[in-house]
Image: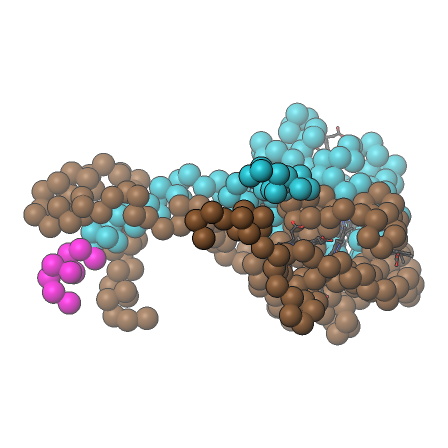
Chain colours: A brown, B cyan
Amino acid sequence: MNLSSLKCVPVLALGALLAIVALPVQVIAAEGAETLQLAAVSQANTFNRNLKKEKSRNPPPPEDGIHDVENEATFILQSPREAFAELPKTAFGNYVDWVKAIDQKLLRPRWDRLNSAEEPFVMDLDIVRPVKASVPDVVFPHRQHTEWLFCSNCHPAIFIPQKGANQINMSAILLGRKCGVCHGKVSFPITTKSCRKCHSKPKPKGWKPPLSEATLRNPWK
Amino acid sequence: MTAQAMHKRVWGSMVAGVMMGLTMLLVSPSSNAEYADVVINNYADAAGMRPAVFPHWFHRIRFRCKVCHADLGFKFKAGGNKITMAKIIDGKFCGACHNGEVAWSVENCAMCHSGIPGTPTHFHGSTLQRLVAPAYKPLPVGKSMKKNK
């Protein structure tokens, strides 16, 4: 960080304060000669018009915006930040790698409500789904799923248990169907940094994206 | 830094600050909750209780999804299980564990009913909620080619 950006920090804070009394800023702005430069920069020239940024990761319940601070028990609830301190990290969702946490035996969630000795019914079967776009092909791993879930959680309500029998695309997933029933809700979400978790099998050598018809017949070529 | 550049920077920061202040006022505070927290408020508000908040992260540390979503019959739908206190004291849903044996008992009302009053039932941090625009609609198979013919 350089010195000049450091200097901006208090000014930013002042600006934020002024926002609450928003009008004076414009009045002051109308006085100086340099304000012409400010006026020259259009409102259109802003950043992050649509970018949604997380304010902080794993905030404690009293700061998370859904728990009521008037409720005393809110302060007894555990902070996810503290709970996750020793677990392996990811860059999305809960920012915890739940698969690694189990594989490394850092967590041992019960498979049965009462009996902590009962083992999950794990099935190691990968299903590869070739994708017609340039992203790597999708590998659906039964192992990681059956560590957490039972067959009846997916079969047959979400997926017919037969390779290739289910039509899946990103639109359905983003709308919360198919893989999106869980991914984007509880299991890791769909975001730039997570694409390769599902799209994990490199394309066959020499694979090129098919050209669209409009390009093949382009009269201005 | 020249005086002019400095001035520019100050005003630039002011504008940024104003924008920041405005977004602070506009963005709903709920946008910061832990991924997969569920607010359940089919009935609670109407009966004068704060909405219930269910933290997935806390429970999945202790139980696999299978326990709740296969054995206890929780459907994959926020608000879709029509949970009531009558069912809970009969040992269903949250009551299968919050019974003083597996976990603390049901008289600890405020532990579950901890949501900000008026918060609607919703699933926190879902990808769909975070999209700038609703997801795309793919073209029907073959449509992209026919269009230009």
Q: Is residue B43 left or right of residue B18?
A: right
Task: Report the front residue among B134 and B37.
Answer: B134
Considering only vertical position in the picture, is B133 above or below A61?
Answer: above
The residue furthest bottom is A104
The residue furthest left is A33
Q: Is residue B7 magenta?
A: yes
Task: Report the front residue among A144 and A159.
Answer: A159
- Residue at 73% across / 66% down in the picture? A99
> What quarter of the picture does the N terminus of chain B occupy?
bottom left
The percent coordinates of residue A194 (x first, y second) are 62, 61
Q: Is residue B19 left or right of residue A147?
A: left
> What quarter of the picture does the C terminus of chain B occupy?
top right
The residue furthest top is B46
Q: Which residues are magenta?
A: B1-9
Instruction: Characterize the magenta stretch by its predominant secondary structure.
Output: helix
Q: Is residue B12 left or right of residue B129?
A: left
Q: Is residue B99 left or right of residue B40?
A: right
The percent coordinates of residue A154 (x first, y second) are 83, 49
Q: Is residue A134 magenta?
A: no
Q: How many numbered callouts?
A: 0
- Residue at 26% across / 60% down in the picture? A8
The percent coordinates of residue B21 (x first, y second) are 34, 45
- Residue at 88% across / 51% down in the picture? A161
Task: Report the front residue among B127 and A106.
Answer: B127
**Residue B32 in sight in this render:** no
Considering only vertical position in the picture, is B91 above or below A200?
Answer: above
Q: Quadrant of residue A113?
A: bottom right
**Residue B9 in sight in this render:** yes
Considering only vertical position in the picture, is B75 above or below A134?
Answer: above
- Residue at 19% across / 39% down in the picture? A26
